[in-house]
Image (spheres, coloured by chain):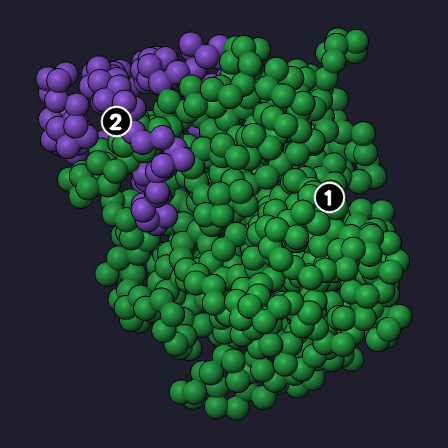
Amino acid sequence: MIPIDDTTPEALFADALMPLQQVRSRKDLHYFARSADAAEPSYWQPVATRTGGMVRCALGEAEGTALLEALGAHWDATGESQLGSLLPELEAMRRALHEAAPAAAERTSTISYSAYPLF
Amino acid sequence: MNPSAPAPTLLGVSALYHDAAAALVRGPEIVAAAQEERFSRKRHDPRLPEHAIDYCIAAAGGPAEIDGVAFYEDPALALDRVLKGVIETAPASEQIWSTAARLQLGEKINVAEALTRKLGPLAADNVFFVDHHLSHAASAFYPSPFEDAAIVVADGMGEWASTSIARGSPAGIEMLAQIHYPHSLGLLYAAFTYHCGLKVNSGEYKLMGMAPYGEPRHVQRILDELVDLRDDGSFRLNTEYFGFLDSDEATNAKFDAWAGGARRAPESPIDVRCMDLAASVQAVIDEAMFRLAREALARTGSRNLCLAGGVALNCVATSRLASRLNGPRHVWIQPASGDAGGALGAALHVAHEHYRQPRHARVGSDDAQQGSLLGPEFDDAAIEAALQEAGIVFHAVGRGADHTRRVAQALADGLIVGRFDGRMEFGPRALGNRSILADARRPDGQSHINLRVKFRESWRPFAPVVPIERVADYFDTDAPSPYMVRVAAVKPELRREVDWAGFRDGESDMLKVLNQPRSSLPGITHVDYSARLQTVDAATQPGLHALLAEFEALTGCAVLINTSFNVRGEPIVCSPADAIACFLHTGIDVLAIGGCIAFKKEQSAELRAMEGKASFDPD
C-alpha cells in the first residue's frame, strides 16, 4: 500500500491498482465482458445504481469526502470491500488535487473527448 | 404533496464532461434552460456552467428563491466505473488514469461544493444527485405530452449505463433494464465518426449527413465482427476493435485494418470508403434503435415512446424507427437530448420524485418544452444600445407587421437574414430565434451561405422551416416537427433526378452531387431527398410564422432555409453583441434583431470591411 503522503495518481496506479489487476487476472475475474457471448440469451443487464436513482444530501453529505465514504459503503454492500482499501489514498489524492485544481473559469480543457473512461 | 405548499423551485446542472448546462423548474413547469457555451463562447463548454447558473438564478428571482439543486449524475458511481475500467485494462490504462484521476477526484467528486457556492442555505441543504440515464429519461418523459410512455435512453455512457429502457407512468419513472459500459451505441457511432476524420461528440451529425452518399455494404460485417445485436435490442461490442477503453483514441489499428485504411485526416477529401462506412454504421444504428424501441414498447405495453441521450439526436435513426413501428405510436424526443438536457431532466425528476409535483398542465394535448425557447431574451432598449455601441446603422421599426414585411422582402430578394428574436433556444438546434434564414429555392443557396456565412464547404444541406399547415405541400408528412429532430422526404413531384455518374468510380466529389438542384427546394434537399424538418405553429412562434406567411405571399413558397446563427466553430449567438459580431464578420446581408433591422449595404465602409475577417476553429 502506498504511503498517504504520496498522493499522485501514478503512485496509486503502481502501488494499488496494478496489484489489484494482477490478483483479479490470476483469478480470471473481470468487471465487464469485452466481446460477444453466444451462450448469453440476452445482453440486458440490471440497472446499475448506487442510490436507487436519486439521493438527497445536505451539503456536508454531498461533499467529496462524504461521497468517497458513500462509495466505500456501496462497495461493501456489493461484496467488493477489497476496493475499500483504496479509500484513504483516494481521499488524500482528492484533497491534494482539489487544492491544486484551477478554478473552473480558468480551466481550458485539452482532453480528447474520445477518452470516455476519463469521465 | 401538500396542495397548499408553494411549488418548489429547483436548479438542474449538467457539467464536467460535455456541453454543460443549467435549467430551472418551478413545480412541474420549465422556467429556463441554457447551455454554458452560449455565454462563454467556447463550443460544447464542459466546465461548471457558471453563466448558465447565473441566468437561471436571475430567472428564479435570486439565489434565496431556489429550494434545491440537482446534479445530473452520481459522481461516486462514475468514479466506480472509472476505477474498475482502469483496473480491468491495466497496465495499458496507466496514462489515462493520470488524467482521469485529476478530473474525477479534482473536480467531479467535489461538485456539490461548487454548485452550492452561489445558492442560499436552503439549496445547500437540498443537494440531489440523479443517475445520468434517469436524468435523460426524465428529460424526455416529464415534458412530453404523454401520461404514460416507454422510454429509451442511448448515449456514450453515464455512470455505467450506455443504454436504458424505462417505463414512465403517473407513478413516475421505473428503470427496467440497461446495457453497461463499454458496450455502447454512442461509442460505436463515435468510433466511426473518429475514423472518418470528424470530431467525436460534435461530428456525429456530419457522419449522419455523409451516409446518404455511401452504400451500406459493411452492415453485415459490422454485425458479425464489431457488435452483436440481438433481436431484443440488447447488444455487445467486440472491444478488441476500439481504443476507448485504455487510450484517448476511439479506435485502434485493428479497427483501421477492419475498415480498410487509416483514419481519414481531418479536412482532407472524403472518399467513397468513408461514405460507405458512414452509410453502414447509420444502417446499424437505425436497426438497433428500432429494436430498442420495439423492446421498450413491448415491456411497458405503452403506445407512446420517449427518447433521449445523444444517440436520440440521430434524427435519421429516430425517424426511421417511428415509421417502422407497428400500429399507431406517438414518439416524443427531448430536443436537448445530449448531456445539456440532463440538467433539465435532473431538476424535473427531483420535482416529481422528491417533491411529488403533478405532471405539467398540458399532458394529453401538448408538451411542456415551450418550443425549447428557454434561454435569455433581450428587450429593444438593450438591442438598440448594442447596435449603437457597435456603430451600426439600423431601422427601429418595432416588432410588428412592417418589420415582418421588410424582412420577408429581403428574403424574397435573395438576401441572407440573421434573425435574432425572443428567447434563445435550448438544445443544439436553432429554431428561428437565433437563426440564419434564406430562400430555399435559390439554386446556389447551399454554396452561397456556406461560403459567405459559414466559411465551409459542406456536404450537408440546410434544414427547412415551414408552417405546420403547409408542411404536407412540400414533404411526405403532415406531422408536427417543431424541434427539428425528425427527417422527412421532399414530395416526389418536387424532386429532380440526381446525376451520380462517375461518383463511385473514383471521382467521389460530394459537392458536385450536392450542387445539382435535387428539387425545387435545392437548399434544403439532401441527395437522398430527405430534409431535417422544422415545422412552426402560430401559437408557439407567432413572429416566425408570420414571416413565413409573408414570404409565401411574396413568392408563392412557404419554405425557408433555417441554419444556426453562428460561424463555423463557434456556438450559436446568445446576446445582441454576439449577433452583431456575426453579422459584421460574415456575409449576412440583413440583421433582423428584435424590433430593429440593419442592412449590410447601409453600413460604413469600415464596418463592411470586417466581412470575412473572423478567425475560427475547425468544427
| Residue shown at the point (71%, 39%) measured from the top left | B369
Mark 1 to mark 2: distance in Å? Answer: 44 Å
Q: Secondary structure at mark 2?
A: helix
Instruction: Output the chain of dot 2.
Output: A
Q: Is residue B144 visible?
A: no
Q: Tell me where residue B98 appears, x and y as whole percent.
A: 21, 36
Which chain is the one coloured green?
A: B
* B434 horizontally vs B478: left or right: left
* B94 horizontally vs B373: left or right: left
Q: Tell me where residue A84 appears, x and y as whole percent.
A: 25, 16
Callouts 1 and 2 in the same chain: no
The residue to which callout 2 is attached is A100
| Residue shown at the point (54%, 10%) measured from the top left | B121
Q: Tell me where residue B164 appears, x and y as whole percent.
A: 52, 37
Q: Secondary structure at mark 1?
A: helix
> Which three-letter amino acid code belongs to the residue tagged 2?
Ala
The residue to which callout 1 is attached is B381
Give neighbour class at mark 1: few <14, some 14-19, many 20+ (Cα, 10 Å). few
Q: Quadrant of residue B83?
A: top left
- B242 vs A97, nearest the viewer: A97
What color does chain A have in the rendering? purple
Instruction: Output the chain of dot 1.
Output: B
